[in-house]
Image (cartoon, helix red, strand yellow):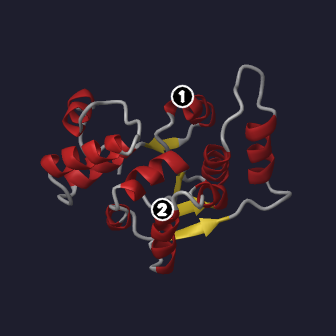
């Protein structure tokens, strides 16, 4: 799979908070896309270290920024998701909306942990989707981490208030026992 991965704020920040964004670069060389809206969300003065880590990823060409241009299909979908979604859908955040719009219109993969907000759109738009758990599972399958390292990363992410859905990486693996190479 060579499709771009469009990261929303929660998924990207899980790796930034534990300073292990290099794992993303190893897994997805040339494929990491950070929507400008996500970059803005992670550029708050209270978390300058996260912005600095993104800036390093961009300067090293491990990731690229992508803006949504006015008058494009991406823009129309983005505006709809953040201002007036279809009946039965809730307004979602700028980062999630930008990542969804770009992934849908460019045939990419959505990287998001916020299943509550994005699951309906993943299904509705037929998007490929990855969570932090999926990413760590891929890293394990490729020998980039051990299960013990995955558990430590998971613990560190939870300690930084990342919501991952399981208490440990081992619990995630146990609950997601399908072929470890399914999502690459």
Q: Is residue 60 above or below residue 179?
A: below
* Residue in the picture at 81% in, 33% down: 84
Q: Residues within 10 Å of mark 1 (few under 14, many from 20)?
A: few
Q: Residues within 10 Å of mark 2 (few under 14, many from 20)?
A: many
Instruction: Please report whichever mark, 2 or 1, sits nearer to the chain's N-terminal start.
Output: 2
In the image: residue 98, left or right of residue 76: left
Q: Tell me the residue that label 1 is attached to.
A: 116
**Foreground: 71 or 149?**
149
Q: Secondary structure at mark 2?
A: helix
Q: How far across and down, in percent of the image, does residue 34 sit?
A: 56, 61
Q: Secondary structure at mark 1?
A: helix
Determine whether label 2 and label 1 are within 8 Å by CB. Answer: no
CA separation in Å, label 2 and label 1: 24 Å
* Residue in the picture at 49% in, 70% down: 52
Quadrant that contains the N terminus = bottom left
**Foreground: 120 or 95?**
95
Q: Is residue 27 above or below residue 155?
A: below
Q: How far across and down, in percent of the image, does residue 70 sit?
A: 83, 59
Q: Tell me the residue that label 2 is attached to.
A: 50
**Foreground: 89 or 183?**
89
Q: Which mark is residue 51?
A: none
* Residue in the picture at 77% in, 27% down: 86
Please identify the residue farthest to the front as the structure is shown.
Answer: 46
Q: How far across and down, in percent of the image, does residue 58 sit?
A: 51, 74
The quarter of the picture where residue 161 lies is top left
The quarter of the picture where residue 43 lies is bottom right
Please identify the residue farthest to the right as the structure is shown.
Answer: 71
Mark toward the viewer: 2 or 1? 2
Q: How many marks?
A: 2
In the image: residue 106, left or right of residue 179: right
Q: How far across and down, in percent of the image, does residue 182 sit?
A: 31, 43
């Amino acid at each position: 799979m060579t499709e771009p991965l469009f990261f929303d704020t929660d998924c990207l920040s899980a790796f930034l908070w534990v300073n292990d964004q290099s794992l993303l670069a190893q897994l997805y060389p040339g494929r990491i896309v950070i929507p400008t809206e996500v970059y803005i969300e992670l550029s708050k003065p209270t978390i300058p270290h996260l912005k600095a880590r993104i800036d390093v990823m961009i300067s090293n060409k491990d990731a690229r920024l992508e803006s949504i241009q006015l008058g494009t299909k991406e823009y129309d979908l983005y505006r709809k998701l953040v201002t007036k979604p279809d009946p039965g859908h809730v307004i979602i955040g700028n980062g999630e909306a930008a990542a969804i719009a770009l992934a849908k219109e460019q045939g990419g993969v959505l990287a998001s942990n916020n299943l509550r907000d994005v699951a309906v759109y993943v299904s509705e738009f037929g998007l490929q989707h990855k969570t932090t758990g999926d990413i760590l599972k891929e890293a394990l399958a490729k020998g980039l981490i051990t299960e013990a390292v995955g558990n430590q990363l998971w613990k560190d992410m939870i300690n930084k208030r990342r919501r991952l859905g399981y208490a440990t990486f081992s619990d995630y693996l146990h609950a997601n026992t399908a072929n470890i190479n399914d999502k690459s």
